[in-house]
Amino acid sequence: MQNIVVFGASGQLGQCLKNVAELKQINSIIFPPETEANILDMDAITQIFEQYKPAYVINCAAYTAVDKAEDDVDMARKINRTGAANLAAQCREHGAVLVHISTDFIFKGDKPYPLVESDVAEPVSIYGLTKLEGEQDIISILPQHYILRTSWLYSEYGNNFAKTMLKLGTERDELKIIADQVGTPTYAIDLAGAVLDIIASGSESYGVYHYSNEGVTSWYDFAKGIFDLAGSKVKAYPIRTSEYPTKATRPAFSVMDKAKIKSTFNIQIPYWRDSLAICLEKLK
């Protein structure tokens, strides 16, 4: 296989890609440290491209602090838009394909049906807006791209909802969890596997795709699943979004339709709770 370079290698998905690449025995994948692969530093990016001559670039780097982004607009836009555009420009110059990770937060989340790739994007947060701008810039710069929108990412790596709930479950007797925001948790190991399968396919079916685990749940039910599978005794109570105000607005319903990615690449997607059980077993 030709060289693959991962930007954002130290993040949750970057670490999952490393894990899955080892299992699949992919030796041509490179994980440069962010000190050498800053997506805002064009000289550094150019050096990476000239050194490794990648056929594929995977962009896992992102500003993902959703609430913080509301006050830190410039930095969120630099990382989520400018950084993405920088990579697209270098991919175009060097003949590489870009696999870029995006988010369900580009949608308003007010439609009660699974969202397809062509549905209108109406972000309701700075995070969602800057991620959408990144998508748009990639599309305008580089035809050879895969944009994978995902949701509610968790794994045994990094900071995420599953690990936070496990920690809080050992510290408190009861927790209140939002029950009126609905979506699908995504095990980052499953997403990493899908990304590498798309690359291995050698397909040229470029474009935007949705990927999350199968099924539909709320944050409350996701938390209940975590506590049940982990054998935690903590009591969880459902609350409304209005009872837990946050700086940034979240989509109320952001379930994504995965028919396109499944039919194009013949990808089997696990049910969210099955993948959660695997992750929690690894975290024990």
Image: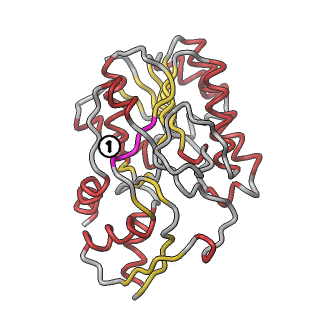
Badge 1: residue crowd in 10 Å (few <14, some 14–19, many ≥20): many
Q: Which residue is the site of mark 1? A: 190
Query: Which quarter of the figure is the N terminus placed in?
Result: top left
Instruction: Judge by depth and name the residue closer to the eye, 1 or 190.
Output: 190
Q: Which quadrant of the structure image shows residue 39?
A: top right
Q: Write the start and end of the magenta stretch as one range.
A: 210-214
Q: In this view, does 130 lie above or below 195?
A: below
Residue 10 visible from this viewpoint: no
Q: Residue at x 51, y 33 (%)?
A: 117
Left or right: residue 42 compared with residue 47: right
Principal secondary structure, stretch drawn in magenta = loop
The image position of residue 212, as x and y in percent, is 40, 44
| Residue found farthest to the bottom | 173
User: At which x and y percent is residue 217?
Assistant: 40, 59
| Residue depicted at 39% across the width and 64% down the height | 162
Q: Name the image quarter holding residue 192.
A: top left
Decide whether residue 165 is among the magenta residues: no
- Under circle 1, the secondary element is helix
